[in-house]
Amino acid sequence: MRVLILGSGGREHALAWAVAYSPLLSKLYIAPGNPGTAELGENVPIRAADVPAVVKFCQEQSIDLVIPGPEAPLVAGVADALAAAGIACCGPSAAAARLEGSKAFAKEVADAAGIPTAEWAEFEDEEAAHEYVEEMGAPIVIKADGLAAGKGVVVAQTIEEAHGAIHAIMAERVHGAAGEKLVIEECLEGEEVSVFALCDGLEAVFLGCAADHKRVGDGDTGPNTGGMGAIAPPPWADGEVVDRAMAEIIRPALEEMVLRGTPFRGFLFAGLMLTAEGPKLIEFNVRFGDPECETLLPMLKSDLLPALVAATNGTLRGMELRWKDEASATVVMCSKGYPGAYATGGEIFGLEEAGSLPGVCIFHAGTMAEQESILANGGRVLAVNAVGEDLAEAIERAYAAVDTLDWADGFCRRDIGRRAV
Ligand code: AMP
Ligand code: GLY
């Protein structure tokens, strides 16, 4: 099989790593990829969300399967354009990608499918939103409807903060067109987990459960990021939570999407709050998480590629993936200043030594190769993963790798998984 992965982050490096050794694979391309993916396949200089260029490349290179990493190409319709060209894509149509592209749409689907989720209301009128918040009180959650790079959500502890968020999103348009509509939600309390499933429209295969660390600072302080680290499995999500998430959230969502004539194929990511009343949906994403993907795939024993193919042609039913009975932890290393402004270009030493430590896999994200050197070239730069017998060992191994690296301009959280062990 000739396969093309779209994206350039740690998630895409992990996907490339998982399919690179499949006996089914004959050629692997990554667009645009990074220095890590270049070790496993051929990087091509095409932007992941440049749909016409992706389709043209697939036609020229007789690609059999496209695996999109991020949401942007999916929301832009890459799966539809590929389908029209007769090329399989392990990702949803633009219509199904609205589960991530519009928070109001996701809530409407959740309600129609009877999925437990926070009480909510949507607004296109700023005044009405302010009035609603006065009526409901704080804490309350304010969300820009559209894609806002993970920054469109404000968990407001006070009414004043809520009014400020409404004004910033709707009047100042801090997230641009994503703020044309607003979703206001009840604030849920509990532990958060992310549940992943591979879907073929009707069937869903469980891909694991992980806990992300979204804030930049130790002890969950500072601004939100794309994710500073993850652990799997989170000790607060046992088998019962997983069963309920699959039965009460993932499968009903698939059924509802079929009823709407827009079946969901690809990776479905359900962000959940484990409330006193059981798991409730916070949001859907239509892709694998980053760094959750780098955390879960190193525990997979089965070949991923046949499952991805099955997801595209509706034959997932009965497919079982085998997993290591171990635990996994990922520490994300970032350029100092992230998620604000940061400098790039600093050299990273010790990658080979750190990557050869027991259980360790280092996935590249914002890196750049210059001759024999690897330089930092982004905010999130490396995802340092380790698998161990239990979480304590996985975490210890990941930090041993982090401490073997020598990168003057880098930093990471020092408390990934601490609350779990
Ligand atoms: P989202 O982008 O929808 O995942 O939201 C970002 C973060 O905001 C989530 O990971 C939660 O920590 C928090 N959040 C979102 N919605 C709620 C809610 N209804 N109640 C409490 N926290 C929430
Ligand atoms: N790590 C969270 C996400 O990928 O959205």
Image (spheres, helix red, strand yellow):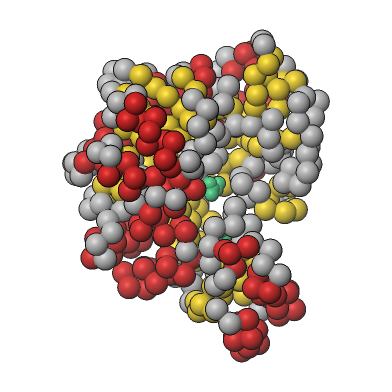
Q: Say above or below: 86 vs 358.
A: below
The quadrant of the picture occupied by the N terminus is top left
The image shows residue 88 at horizontal and vertical percentages of 28, 38
Task: Please tell me in which quadrant of the rendered image residue 370 appears.
Answer: top right
Number of dots carrying numbers: 0
Looking at the picture, tell me which residue is in the foreground, 37 or 272. Answer: 37
Let me know if residue 326 appears in the view. no
Q: Residue at x 68, y 74 (%)?
A: 171
On the image, the x and y values in percent for residue 415 come to 69, 41
Residue 379 is at least partly visible in this image: yes
Examine the rendered structure and indicate whether residue 185 appears above or below residue 406.
below
Q: Residue at x 23, y 53 (%)?
A: 202
**In the image, residue 66 above or below residue 190:** above
Query: Which residue sits at x=53%, y=67%?
Result: 145
Side of 118 relative to 225 (left or right): left
Residue at x-position 64% and y-position 61%: 175
Q: Dividing the image into 4 quarters, which one contains the C terminus?
A: top right
Identify which residue, 375 or 245, lies in the foreground. 375
**Can you give x and y, in whole percent of width and height, for residue 76 in the image?**
44, 50
